Amino acid sequence: MNGVVIIGPTAVGKSSLGMRLAEQLGGEIVSIDSRQIYRGLDIGTAKANTFEQARVRHHCIDILDITEKSNARWFADLAREAMDSIRAVGRIPVLVGGSGLYLRSVTQGLFEIDLDRSERLQFEKSIEDTSATDLHAKLSAADPESGERIHENDRYRIVRALEVFILTGTTMSEHFRRQKNAGVDGMSGLVRIGLNLEREALRSRIEERTREMFDAGWPDEVSALLDKGADTQCPGLQTLGYPETIGYVKGEQARNESIGRIATLTARYAKRQMTWFRKEHDVSWQDAGAEGLFETVLNILDSAGTS
């Protein structure tokens, strides 16, 4: 067995299962999360705390400042290096996360698109005054799959997907379909476990977790970043839930309003995650609320030759 992959929507219980499996199997966790890469974003990203990181070594977290932009190809290189280092000491990499794009970039690689720089600049100039909402609507019309996958406020990825379509004549979704699994070493033999919950049960868990995050000090975390001079428009603070928490900290909306809004956005994000993950192959999907889940997963891994 070359490693374990645990995927599924946010708040479904991936991290908890990953911790137990890593301890049981003698493994280390490779976070496949596009938000936990940022230093200082801890509570709002459900990052493993100090105690948990002492129990099981975590890789690919706290690797960017909130002012820096992430890049899936760069992340994939780091994650593969981490996997190699884990295997080199006789341990098992346990990949855990909800970023479908990052997972695919690690396990399959990303397609190369050579776009003319002058055409890219011309395209960017043409949409300077177009809102993210309007751009997302255009993307959804041209490439429904990408429109479903990319959040309506994520202008950077919306623009990227639109420019790929406009400048190549082919949607980003189609580029993804054309990419091949070959050429990425060390990715065979990964056992993939997917966790999911019935929609209302997941929605309830999301609401509960969001409230717990606020109780645990998410607003204080944001206040500390702002007190240090963080720009509210920097890439890290555009991640899910942080703009709404900033709004609460600044007194622009009430606590319950912020919590409710974050829960709603998170539920929408969870839906997009599942839209992506359903296209993944060879995933053993499990009910995250089922009794004996851990034992069931251990049996699956045992059948795959992990022990």
Image (cartoon, rainbow, N blue to C red):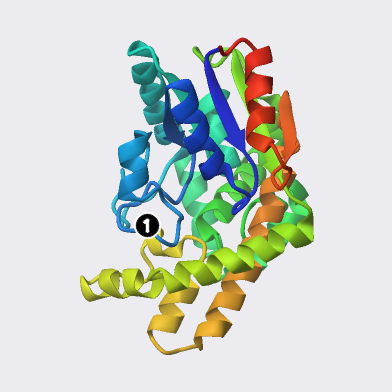
Within 10 Å of the Cα at label 1, are there few (<14), some (14-19), or many (20+) other Cα atoms?
many
Q: Position of residue 15 (x, y in %)?
A: 51, 43
Of residues 301 and 206, the one nearer the viewer is: 301
Residue 253, above or below 91: below
Q: Nearer the viewer, residue 157 or 228?
A: 228
From the top left corner, tell me how far across and down residue 174 is, in percent.
Answer: 72, 34
For badge 1, the amino acid type reads Asp
Q: Residue furthest left?
A: 228
Q: Position of residue 102 (x, y in %)?
A: 52, 37
Q: Nearer the viewer, residue 266 or 93?
A: 93
Q: Quadrant of residue 263?
A: bottom right
- Work out whether residue 37 can be spotted: yes
- Tell how many labels: 1
Residue named by callout 1: 42
The residue located at (67%, 21%) in the rendering is 299
Q: Secondary structure at mark 1?
A: loop
Where's the N terminus, which quadrant?
A: top right
| Residue beneath the point at 38% across and 12% down | 90
Say which quadrant the C terminus sits in. Answer: top right
Q: Can residue 109 be seen in the rendering of this structure?
A: no
| Near-viewer residue (100 or 147) | 100
Residue 185 drawn above or below residue 151: above
